[in-house]
Amino acid sequence: MATVSIIVTTYNVEQYIEECLASVAAQTLHDIEVLVVDDGSTDSTPSLIREFAARDSRFVPVLLEQNSPGGVATAANAGLDRATGDWIGFVDGDDFVEPDMFESLVNAASLGNADLAMCKYLEVDETSGQRNEPADAHRWATLEDPVYPLDVVNRQMFLRFIAVPWRKLYRRDLLEDNKIRFPEGDYFFEDNPFHWFAILSAKAIAIVPKALAYHRVARAGQTMATADERLFRIFMHHDTIHRWLVERELLGIYQVPLLTWVISQLEWISRRTPQELRGQLYAAVRPIFAQYDVGTVIRALNEGNKGEKTRRLSLALAKGDQSGFSKGLEGRPDTNNLLLVGWHHLRYSGVRRTAQITGRYAKQQVDKSDALGRVTRVRGRHTVSNADLMFALATLQQQLDEMQERLAQLEQSPEGSFSRSAAPESADPR
C-alpha cells in the first residue's frame, strides 16, 4: 500500500499530459501510486497515458470509455474507488506540480496529526506563461500556525478558500469513514460540495504556505471559459450541501455561511451574464432564496461584507421581485456594447490587466469548438461574433487619451454609470 494515492484526472489534454505526469513522477516522495483517470478523451490523451505508464509501474491507467456529463466528478470518484494509499491527492491533467509537493503535504499533516493539508498554488496564464496568485491569496495573510483545529470558527474561515482539491491532501480514512465523494451529475464546480464535506468532517488542517501546484487558466475547453447558462448550474450545489447539512444536523450552524457562498457565486456570475440570459439566472437562483427569510439573507450579506449592488440583487431574490432583480443588474456591462464593456474592465482591472484579458479571451474564442454556438466554422475559417470580441474592440485603442475623453462622456450618461464596488472573489475560478 502506497503512502499517497495521487489521482490525475484528464480529458482531451494531449498538449499538457506528459508535462503533468512527468512532474508527478519526479516527486521526492517515491512511495506513491498514480491513478490516471481519463474521462473518455477523443484525442491522443489515452495513448499518451498508456505510454507513460509503461515506463513507470507506479502509474495506473484508468480509461473510461465515454465522457461523463458535467465536470470531473465521475473520473475523480473512479480514482477514489481504486485508491489504496494512506493519503489522497489530486492533480488536474493539464496542471503541473513541484517535486516536493506531496512530501511537504504528508509531512505537514503527519506532524500536525491533521486529516487535511493545504498548500498555495499559482495560476499560469496559458497565453503569456505569466504566473499569478489566485483570488484567495490574501486569505493566507491571516494564517500563522502550521495546523488549525477545525472548530466552528476555523471551519467557516477555511470554507471561504477556493474549493479546488488539487492543492490539498486528504487522509483516506476521512473520505471513506464519512462517505465523501464528488456529486455526479450534469453540472460543473462539483469540487465545492466536496470542499464543504471535507472541511466539515475533518478535525484539523495543516498549512504549507508555499506555492507547490500550478494551475493553467485561459485554456480553451476549461469550465471557466464558458460564458453561457451552464455557469448557472453551480447553484444546484446549494441543495446538495443543504441536504448534507440537514442529514448531519449541522444546518443551524452553517446555513448562513452556505447562503453567503450562494451570494458570492451570484456576484461573479451576474457580472458575466448577458442580458438575454438574466431571466434564466433569476429562475436558477430564486428557488434558493425562497428557502430563507429576509432576516437570514441580511445576516449572510453582513457576514460576507457584501456591497450595495449585491444587497439589492439578493433582497430582490428573497422577496421574489424579478423586476427589482432585473433593475439591479442594469449596472452590469452590456455585452453587446463593446465600448461599455471595455470601459468597465479598464476601470476595475486597469489597462495592463484589460489588455491581457483581451488577448487571452479573443484567442480562446477563436480556438475553442463551436459547441457553445459562439464560434462557428465557415468555409474552413473561424467567424467570431461581436460578443466574443467584446473586450477586444474596446481595448485595441492606441490613443488612450482620446479614449479616456470619450469614456468620460459615457460616464455622464445613464448607460455609462457603473457600480464602483470591486469585482467579487470567485469561490471556484477554474
Image: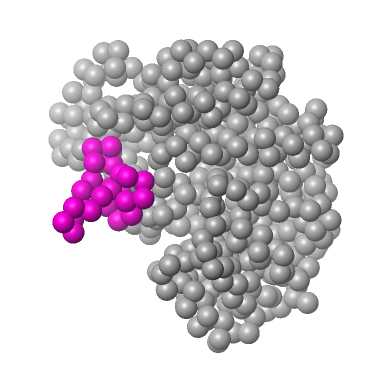
Q: Nearer the viewer, residue 384 or 94?
A: 384
Q: Nearer the viewer, residue 166 or 269?
A: 269
Name the image quarter holding the N terminus. Answer: bottom right
Report whether 377 appears left or right of 79: left
Whether residue 206 is visible to the viewer of this picture, yes or no, is: no
At a point 66% along the width and 49% down the height, the residue shown is 183
Report whether 82 appears left or right of 358: right
Q: In the rendered view, tell whether residue 192 sits above or below residue 288.
A: below
**Magenta residues, as a range?**
362-388
Q: In the rendered view, tell whether residue 393 sits above or below residue 179.
A: above
| Residue 419 highlighted magenta (yes or no) | no
| Residue 382 highlighted magenta (yes or no) | yes
- Horizontal and vertical percent for residue 23? 54, 72
Outermost residue toward the bottom?
A: 55
- Horizontal and vertical percent for residue 220? 38, 55
- Horizontal and vertical percent for residue 159? 68, 40
- Horizontal and vertical percent for residue 396? 20, 40
Report whether 201 appears left or right of 219: right
Whether residue 77 is visible to the viewer of this picture, yes or no, is: yes
At a point 61% along the width and 58% down the height, the residue shown is 74
Q: Nearer the viewer, residue 376 or 99?
A: 376
Q: In the rendered view, tell whether residue 209 sits above or below residue 276.
A: below
At a point 60% along the width and 37% down the height, the residue shown is 236
Outermost residue toward the front?
A: 66
